[in-house]
Image (spheres, rainbow, N blue to C red):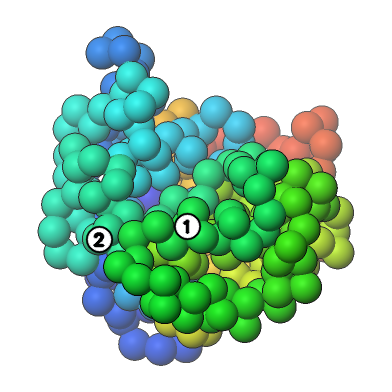
Amino acid sequence: MVTAEPAPDAPAAAGGPVAAPLLTLSNVEVLYSEVIVALKGVSMTVPQGGCVALLGANGAGKSTTLKAISGVIDSEDGRVSAGTINFAARPIHGNDSADVVRSGLVHVMEGRRVLQHMTVEQNLIIGGHLFPSGRTMRAAMERVYAAIPRLAELRKRTAGYLSGGEQQMLVIGRAIMAEPKLMLIDEPSLGLAPRMIDEVFAVLRQLREQGLSLLIVEQNTRVALEIADYGYVMESGRIVLEGRAQELRDNEDIREFYLGLDREGGRKSFREIKHYKRRKRWLG
């Protein structure tokens, strides 16, 4: 049975030994406007080289969690009011978001925020603004094109005229330009056709095979749990369930009550979802 108890070690990469933690949140609380408690005692871990999915309904606190990690929360009148966030064994809560990027953590926010009047290549150059020379920037850009060949084909295209899937690939490519150790990515499948979802997640799968650690916020639980090693389910600002991705996929109660999935993995309507009483051990 999957429980809400924190894992004693970082979740392992698929099929491998337990990996060292790269990102650790311990009892994190977030306040907005010094009044609204958005996160309550959130604890989670992303291992070096691993992929973790953060799941839950709209308004559960998933995006807030990513913003707290990356430091973006400060620009939205929010702050980490309790707990700790450690990245690469160093505390980063309260750090400026630019400093967080320099440390090797990038945040791809929801909504495909491309610079619409610039070309694909110009967008990538913006992502590589921290490079000390044009030579290193060009080398990084070629690595992006090798990882996402579609962007090489579109390099002179104006970003605002790209399809939704192409724009999602562009913001991922722009994030790669910062040469991250960990990428936080918020709702990468949002609003995309099924074929484009598969292409975007194929890019993410390739990146993690190359050693990039990923923390993915997703409502499309099928694709998220196919790529992830481990998952957390969030509700009302709390982590209510966690477990290996396979356990989350296979547990019928979790699938129906928390993820809204039927046995074949399709999304169920609200009336079809069983109204289970939460077992006390699930809530910790």
Which of the 4 quarters of the picture holds residue 122?
bottom right
Instruction: Give the residue displayed 24% in from the left and 50% down from the top.
Output: 99
Which of the 4 quarters of the picture holds residue 206?
bottom right
Element type where label 1 sits in the image: helix
269 sits to left or right of 1: right
The spot of residue 29 in percent (x, y) is 26, 32
Along the viewing direction, whichever of 45 and 274 lies nearer the viewer: 45
Q: Amino acid at mark 2?
A: Ser
Element type where label 2 sits in the image: loop
Tell me, yes or no, if residue 111 can be seen here: yes
Relative to 261, residue 277 above or below: above
Q: CA distance from mark 1 to mark 2?
A: 15 Å
As drawn, the label of residue 127 is 1
204 sits to left or right of 160: left
Q: Amino acid at mark 1?
A: Gly
From the image, tell me which residue sits under label 2.
103
Outermost residue to the left: 90
Outermost residue to the bottom: 16
The spot of residue 85 in percent (x, y) is 22, 49
- Looking at the image, is mark 1 or mark 2 nearer the viewer? 1
